[in-house]
Image (cartoon, rainbow, N blue to C red):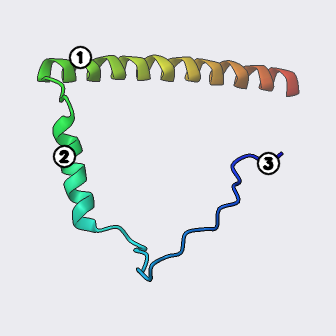
Amino acid sequence: MATGTDNKPAKEDKGRPRRRWPNPALFVRQVIAELRKVIWPTRKNLINYTVVTLIFVLIMVGIVSALDFGLTKAVFAVFT
């Protein structure tokens, strides 16, 4: 049994043309309204988040570099 089907005829369009592109001014107003709802971080929070992110990235670079170096040595040891 198919779901989501009904025997009602489709509603006819009353001759109104369908808008293909939304109104850019409406979009900008909605974006501004949403940005007003954002809770922006304080300077202290921003510095803290930045430091944590940089430390995390440096740790990940170290891990990936160590794995790359180790795998490179292993491949050269096997094939040379």
Q: Which type of secondary structure does the marked residue at label 2 adopt?
A: helix
* Residue plotted at (18% across, 29% down): 40
Q: In the image as oriented, which residue stretches furthest toward the front?
A: 8
Instruction: Give how far apart the Cα atoms at labels 1 and 3 are.
Output: 55 Å
Residue type at mark 1 is: Asn
Between label 1 and label 3, give the one nearer the viewer.
3
* Mark 3 burial class by Cα count in 10 Å: few <14, some 14-19, many 20+: few
Q: Amino acid at mark 3?
A: Ala
Picture residue at 22% right of the left edge, 58% below the top: 28
Disc sitting over residue 33 in the figure: 2
Image point 32% across, 16% down: which residue? 52
Instruction: Name above or below for residue 75 compared with residue 9.
Output: above
Q: 25 or 62: which is nearer to us?
A: 25
Residue 23, picture quadrant = bottom left
As drawn, 75 above or below 18: above
Do the CB atoms of the residues marked 1 and 3 lie less than 8 Å apart? Answer: no
Point out the image quarter for the N terminus.
top right
Instruction: Please name whichever residue, 16 or 72, is drawn nearer the observer in this view of the structure.
Output: 16
Residue mark closest to the camera, 2 vs 3: 3
- Residue at which label 1 appears: 48
Q: Is residue 7 left or right of residue 59?
A: right
Horizontal side, residue 38 vs residue 66: left or right: left
Q: Quadrant of residue 76?
A: top right
Q: Nearer the viewer, mark 2 or mark 1?
A: 2
Residue type at mark 2 is Ala
Mark 3: secondary structure: loop
**Residue 51 coordinates in the image, percent (x, y):** 28, 19
The residue that label 3 is drawn on is 2
Camera sees residue 37 = yes
